Image (cartoon, grey):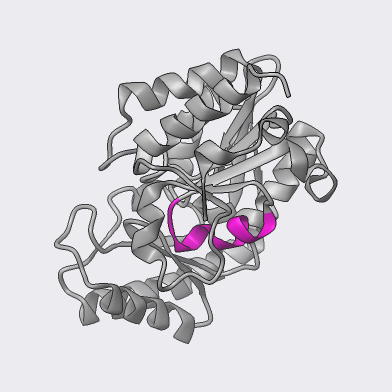
Amino acid sequence: MLNFSNIPTKIANKIDVIFCDIDETISSNGKILPETYSSLWDLHKNNIKVVPITGRCAGWVDHIARFWPVSGVIGENGALYMYMDNKNRLKKRYYLENHQVQESKRKLELIKKEVLTRFPTCKVASDQPYREFDLAIDFCEDVPALTMEEVQEIVKIYEKYGATAKISSIHVNGWFGDFNKLKMTKIFAKDVLGLSLKDELDNVLFIGDSPNDQSMFEFFSISVGVANITKFIDIITHSPRYITKKESGLGFAEMVRVLLSKRTKVD
């Protein structure tokens, strides 16, 4: 991985869309630091669109789409997106059809019961009541931290039932259906931004921090990991092209600072 400070000026000058994870990419130990939130506004002022992509719940997505300086939000690992239209009205799209949702919820209840029996110190994520499509098991946010080996055992329980499971920095998220972050990102880009990502990758940057960002690191040629990605380096197969010096939200702010400083220069 190359240090992000070495990104060429001609690449930086082309970036007009940034897709980004939230937890421990924008946030730092569960908080949005002043310099990180200011960096979102710096991007907005420079006409660079920002689209957070998160495993967090539909309730969070609604809030972020309304109140942050972003062009939309993709939530629950690709199950849905929301954005504010030009009349300042919230618009949303779901990946699954209504008839698929109830069977999914029934099977997720079985998974929850088995996981919490096997790992009694775990809990469902505190935002689970506001989720529409996935089950999030908290392994370190509001509970004593599990080892990575134990976290991977939770993943195996999801997979035993045929669910997709991804490890974030704080949760194991699982769901039924063939959606994922990348698929919904492509749909959002076409629907809302009018972009065909496969044809316009030179204009887009992705930044993340954990194993559930791997498909994004693989797809986007301009991919960045904040420094804390290194804690997962032994279990990811697709690393980002660039890495920041700082971790979490400070790494995101560093990325923005470097990007905008490069854009002021002339080749």
- Dividing the picture into quarters, in which one does residue 181 lie? bottom right
Depth check, front residue: 91 or 211:
211
Q: Is residue 44 above or below residue 214?
A: above
Q: Residue furthest front?
A: 267
Q: Is residue 113 above or below residue 9?
A: below
Q: At which x and y percent is residue 211? A: 46, 63
Point out the stretch of residues depicted in magenta: 209-219
Q: Which residue is drawn at 71% across and 16% down?
A: 86
Q: At which x and y percent is residue 197? A: 78, 46
Prevailing secondary structure of the magenta residues: helix
Q: Residue at x 49, y 61 (%)?
A: 212
Q: Specify whether residue 180 is in view.
A: no
Q: Residue at x 68, y 14 (%)?
A: 87
Q: Residue at x 70, y 27 (%)?
A: 13
Q: At which x and y percent is residue 251? A: 40, 38
Quarter holding the C terminus is top right
